[in-house]
Image (tube, rainbow, N blue to C red):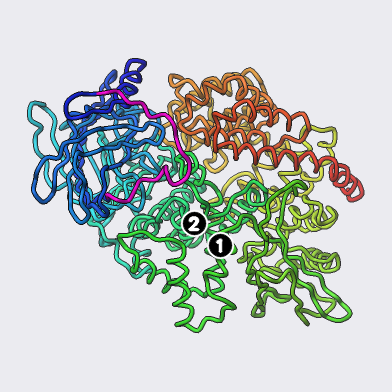
Amino acid sequence: MILLRNLLFLVAVVAVSTSAATPVTKRVGRAGEDLRLPRDILPRSYEVTLLPILIEGNFTTEGYVSISVDCIQSTNNITLHIADIIFNPANIALTDGTTGQLISLNSVVEDKVRQFLILTPNVQLLAGRQYRLSMTFTSILNNELRGFYRSSYSENGTLKYMAVSQMQPTDARRAFPCFDEPNMKANFTMKLGRLTTQLSASNMPVKETTPIADRPGYVWDLFETSLPVSTYLVGMMVSEFTFIDSPAGLSTTPFRIWTRPEAVSQAEYASRIGPQVLSFYEEYFQIAFPLPKQDMVALKDLSFGGMENWGMITYRETALLFDPVKSSESDKQRVVTVVAHELAHQWFGDLVTMDWWSELWLNEGFASYLEYIGANYVEPEFGLIEQIVINDIQDVFGVDALESSHPISVEVNDPNEINELFDDISYAKGASIIRMLNKFLGEQSFRAGLTNYLNDRKYSNAVADDLWSALTAQAIADNVNLPVDVRTIMNTWTLKMGYPIVTVTRDYATSATTVSQERFLLRSNPNSTDETVYRWWIPLTYTSDFSQPQKSSWIAFEQPAIQISNIAASNQWVIFNVDQVGYYRVNYDDANWNMIIAQLLLDYQQISLINRAQLLDDSLNIARVNALPYAIPLELTQYLTKEQDYIPWTSALNGLDYLDLMYIRTTGYGEFKGYLTKLVTPLYDYVKFNDTVGDSHLLIYTRVTAVTWACKLNIGDCVTNSVNFYQAWMNDPTNPTIVPVNQKATITCTAIANGGDPEWNFAFQRYLDSNVAAESSKLLFGLSCSTDPLTLQKLLEWSLDPTSGIRRNDASSVFINVGSNPIGRELTFDFIQTRWSDMVAYFPSLYDLARIVDSVSEGFNTPAEVEELKQLQADHADELGTAARAIDQSIERSESNVEWMSLHYQEVLDWIQQNP
């Protein structure tokens, strides 16, 4: 590898003339638009030929690319992208598309910093003319899960290698030289070489297969030419995988699920739901899926959960495969939601692609919203329409309450900056504001506007204003009553970070109510230089009777507050943000809070399911920022002894988990643990430990939640059940039915926490032997529950050792899981500090490493720990670059925790002591 890296470096800095090669080094990177390709030359079509060599010691790809380009404006150079590719400048050819004449090149320069290949011809290229650029090259089949990379798996004890692609966001340039920007779409004709014992797949169907001359046992698969597509959506695979076709009649599009042979029996569920979701989206958008086939591929190694390559979607095995015996209900939900997410991208992202990465949320926000709609179509009993509130809205509120958050639409140029955008803001906040948009437009106008937008921009690119224009036009056509146009409303949500807290203050004597808005912040920095005006166009909804139609109003951007009259009788509560459709929190005066609490204690079902969850989440978080006495949310939680539904319990426990995190290393933890035990025990007694035949999906989810917390709190029945089931499994390890599948993670964790080396070693061996990726994930989580520091240290060491059996794309989970163990938190942070260089080398993205730090430091609540974080950031500031922002969030959150300890630690304990 050292020799190969040296060779890459030497090739990368060569500049040539027509007579001789002269070395030129480009080392100075520039900021801003200079990192973007010029638009004088745009690609029209590609012919890409790749032959991956899957032989140990020679993991490379022999490649050839021929690009037909249009000259938009006369120019003296062609600039495209290239990275980690070996090439001979003498083998680059440029021809005039009209005359066929070869055009000599004065120089060929690779700018390694900007990943540019700059060609300077000896004549000016003329506007309106077409040219063809072609070159041979060798690229690296890396093991970094990017570009055209290698993956491996075991089959009957034999190690098998495969080649597969992950181009998003900026790694197509590692597979072949290209114009690697999303708004430079082109048609692709792919040609993949393989052994006759292998199969290949790409975005389009195979057109023909022919032998490779002088390579016995090898063939070329030539694929049909694609529709216009961005480089990051090019998909390709060469492997010994097998496939199953979906049952007939579910979709007019042929559907195929690819897996390693030993996992093909786990593909049946995806083969049924995939075509149904695709057909649903065709009806939803009123636009037919335009490709002649859809492949879905299950991979052992993938950096994302799924990747929406047009017509050839790749997934982690945990996101596509489902074993009826060894997979849980949560595994099934993950499969259906990820499949629905990636299939939504076939329209939002593939058919219409964001113009630039600044608008990534147009892809990911819509796919994250539509995944609930599409998955609900095939699994309506899963309650997915309600789950968006706890999975996305309330979850992203956490990061978006930080001053170090960022707007949904944000200017980016550098590849590292682009990688940062793949976060909760683009996905979950994007989904949340789209849901809000749907509600104030109405379903009919929303869908019709989306269809118009997709039809207008299909096979091309779009910016947010294109979407706003289509939705505004539809709203006008449908006579939707809006205070201003959609763009004006939505720009207040997409162009600034954060979200509002709406405060409702009632005058019970006059029946007047003041409704005000301000930014909700976890911690306000008195030295902030941010001059942004944090106000929004807010769609208000409210009710005092959920059996009656809700009422609505707007707060304008210009209005810090408005007055509303007669919202409810003076002795009646009112609740704003009905079903939490708005992306904001709500606080009330104490009297209204107390009436809500009284209603919950009297008859909690008079308040809707989602609003019960909202009240719990809002009150606990508003108290956290010192805007509400903790007595309010804590008194509100008392009704939970009667609550039996999954959604409110999840909101409550997410909020209470923060308090648990603050107390767990303190002398006050015993009292707080007793309070939690009092709340959780009635739910545990209701759902019991074991599943029964006929249990609904959400009842199983509720049981998993109750059992997880009961065992965490050391409730005796839960711990005993877990240890006994695990011991029975150890006595009969090949029996997959001994351990209740939905409780396997908790059982493994609890048994290991209460056991020793035999329990840990058994779980690790089962992890290595398991053929079901979802089961492996549960076992890997359980391994992190050890109470032995040396065992946890060993697990961290093994996660960076490619020979240990822990896969590279599981390594971050190991660090996050061990870091969430109270015994492992400090140990993990120390490991990160001392092994930083090893972790940088092992993780493909510094942003991934920064996210690990953010997760591990979540419970830091002492000044000394804050200083450690700051020192870590300072020590590696140059190396982190733009990824340092993730560490900023860690520091901000930890400083907030320190403030919480000083302000609320005793306040909460006092309430618990007064309410035994």
Identify the magenta region: 22-41
Residue that badge 2 annotates: 365
Query: For this view, does 113 lie left or right of residue 756?
Result: left
Query: 103 and 791: which one is in front?
Result: 103
Residue closest to the far front: 123
Query: For this view, does 661 lie left or right of residue 254?
Result: right
Residue that badge 1 annotates: 433
Residue 715 in view, yes or no: no
Q: Quadrant of residue 718?
A: top right
Is 582 placed above or below 4 here?
below
- Tell me if residue 33 is in the magenta stretch: yes
Q: Classify mark 2: residues with Cα within 10 Å, few (<14), some (14-19) or many (20+).
A: many
Residue 849 in view, yes or no: yes
Name the residue type under label 1.
Ile
**What is the C-alpha distance between the residues marked 2 and 1?**
9 Å
- Mark 1 element type: helix
**Which residue is located at x 21 percent, y 35 percent?**
50
